[in-house]
């Protein structure tokens, strides 16, 4: 999973423009469910050719899990590669290999 937009990583100004387009796309719509929101986000396009991919994650996640500073440091060292440009915003998370 990479938290950025290819080929160049997202900047705050681009992010603002993207969410501005998404907001314009659902203007006047009744946001009655998560599915409606995700479909409206996914239907966002621009004249310059931007398309947005969105999907609803139906998984249930446990609440209240505490992650220690040590666990965060271990995750950073093992699975997170920060990009040169604004690594605090742009990074790639590498998953562990699945099963034997």
Image (cartoon, rainbow, N blue to C red):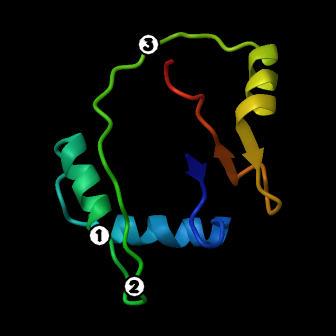
Q: Residues within 10 Å of mark 3 (few under 14, many from 20)?
A: few
Image vertical order of residue 8 relative to residue 47, above or below: above
Q: Looking at this view, is 2 or 19 the one in front?
A: 2
The residue sitting at 32% across, 60% down in the picture is 41
Q: Residue at x 46, y 64 (%)?
A: 19
* Mark in front: 2 vs 1: 2
Q: Is residue 8 left or right of residue 97?
A: right
Q: Which mark is residue 25?
A: 1
Q: Which residue is mark 2?
A: 49
Residue 100 x/y as whole percent: 51, 18
Q: Residue at x 77, y 56 (%)?
A: 83
Q: Assess whether mark 1 and mark 3 are in contact (beta carbons under 8 angstroms).
A: no
SS for callout 3: loop
Q: Disc 1 on helix, strand or loop?
A: helix
Q: Nearer the viewer, mark 3 or mark 1?
A: 3
Q: Secondary structure at mark 2?
A: loop
Along the viewing direction, whichever of 96 and 82 lies nearer the viewer:
96
Total labels: the figure holds: 3
How far is mark 2 from mark 1, CA to CA? 15 Å
Tell me where residue 4 appears, x and y as whole percent. Answer: 60, 58
- Given contact means CB atoms under 8 Å apart, are the residues at marks 2 and 1 in contact? no
Q: Is residue 35 left or right of residue 59?
A: left
The residue to which callout 3 is attached is 62
- N-term-proximal mark, 2 vs 1: 1
**x and y percent of residue 38 in the render?**
28, 51
Determine the image quadrant of residue 58. Answer: top left
Nearest the eye: 13 or 80: 80
Residue 75: horizontal and vertical position, in percent? 73, 26
């Amino acid at each position: 999973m990479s938290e950025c937009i290819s080929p160049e990583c997202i900047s705050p100004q681009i992010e603002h423009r993207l969410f501005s387009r998404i907001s314009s796309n659902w203007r006047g719509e009744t946001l009655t469910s998560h599915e409606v929101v995700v479909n409206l986000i996914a239907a966002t396009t621009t004249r310059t050719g931007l398309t947005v991919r969105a999907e609803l994650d139906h998984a249930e996640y446990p609440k209240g899990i505490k992650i220690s500073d040590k666990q965060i440091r271990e995750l950073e060292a093992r699975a997170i590669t920060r990009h040169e440009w604004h690594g605090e915003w742009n990074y790639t998370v590498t998953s562990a290999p699945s099963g034997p």
